[in-house]
Image (cartoon, rainbow, N blue to C red):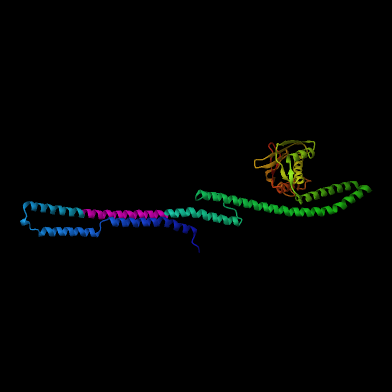
Amino acid sequence: MPFPFRHRILLVLIALGTIPTAIAILGWALTVRATGPGGQSRAALDELGASGRVLIETLDTTRMTASERRALGEHTRELNSALSRIQRAEASSRFYYAGLTVVILVLGGLVLYASVRLGGHLSRQLSRPIDELVRWTGMIGQGERLPSEEAGRGAPEFAALRSALRRMADEIEAGHDRELEAERLRTFREVARRVAHEMKNPLTPIRLAIAQLGRSNGEGQQEALDVLRAESARLEQLAEEFTELGRLPQGPPSEVDLGELATELARHSVPPEVTCRLDISPNTPHVVGYYDPLRRALSNVLRNAVEAMGGRGAIDVEVRLEADSSVLVAIRDHGPGVAPDLRDRIFEPYFTRRAEGTGLGLTMVRQTVEAHGGSVSVTETPGGGATFELRLPA
């Protein structure tokens, strides 16, 4: 079993604190020993005292003059006094150096204890956040959600790493969701293309049969023929929408002026009962894309706005350059609006709130905008209504 990271870093930090301390204590002890009184100096003092006593005993004081005897007595007293002072100083220094040694050992022990405590604290401060980040990377790899935000431990750099990992996990999750949605739409487009092809095959003979029955003009057939014409037209429209949904833009892209396109649609695709107010910013850059799909997308949004207001009212259309170098097309109606819980669902296939709707119009809008590298969203219009915002790269 590998030695845990926390224990390894703890040993390293303790070694960094204790080894220099131990070397310093040893150096202090050797210094005290070198500078303190030793056995050789004590022996020299003893020899000096003994030789002095032998000298005094061997002298014949009877032959000395009075002054010589006084001088010898004075020398003897001074020698004894000096020896006494040296002995007292030696005893004091012995206690001094012993106390100094004890103080050094105590201080060294405290330094060692502080090194161990500090090493343990630093190892926890380093190892715990690292272990947490390692665990988070494993969770990200397994697709698990990271724990909720809590008080960060460790240095501020670890907090920055946590935030970066959270952002990365959110981006990975969002990318996974986008990939799933793209795969689902690809599958749906393929199914829609096949269904449209199969629907168009019987529609041609049905229309021919309806025309033949209409020429016979039998009694009681007119109402049935009207129903057949209406339903076959509805099936044909549904087949066309399926075909458009399953068809991706083809051919080389070209520059498209969204301001000019919005102006044209406002003049020709909006009924006279609806007022279309245009706000086209000058010098709005063109987008590179496919004209026909973009035209159908804007036309679908305008048609939905007209139907949301019951065919009467005013629609505001704005085209401008955003700060992120994208072109914004905002279409605002003043109808009932879209509930917040439905603002994501309205772009799903088959979702519609109209009795005769197919639920494919806004799906095609999102498909077209995302195929051009843009995004579409819906918000609330101030004062009531819905605002569809289409953003495309300039």
84 inside magenta stretch:
no
Q: Quadrant of residue 394?
A: top right
User: Residue 99: x and y, percent?
Assistant: 29, 54
Above or below, comparing residue 327 to residue 33 in the picture: above
100 inside magenta stretch:
yes
Above or below, comparing residue 288 to residue 113 in the picture: above
Q: Report the span colored magenta.
A: 88-116
Q: Is residue 108 visible?
A: yes
- Residue displayed at 25% across by 54% down: 93
Specify whether 128 is left or right of 102.
Answer: right
In the image, 46 versus 172, the foreground residue is: 46
In the image, 349 versus 325, the foreground residue is: 325
User: Residue 369: x and y, percent?
Assistant: 71, 46
- Residue displayed at 35% across by 56% down: 25
User: Residue 73: x and y, percent?
Assistant: 11, 53
Specify whether 381 is left or right of 273.
Answer: left
Specify whether 353 is left or right of 46.
Answer: right
User: Residue 69: x and y, percent?
Assistant: 8, 53
Specify whether 248 is left or right of 31.
Answer: right
Q: Quadrant of residue 62?
A: bottom left
For the stretch drawn in magenta, the main secondary structure is helix
In the image, 289 versus 229, the foreground residue is: 289
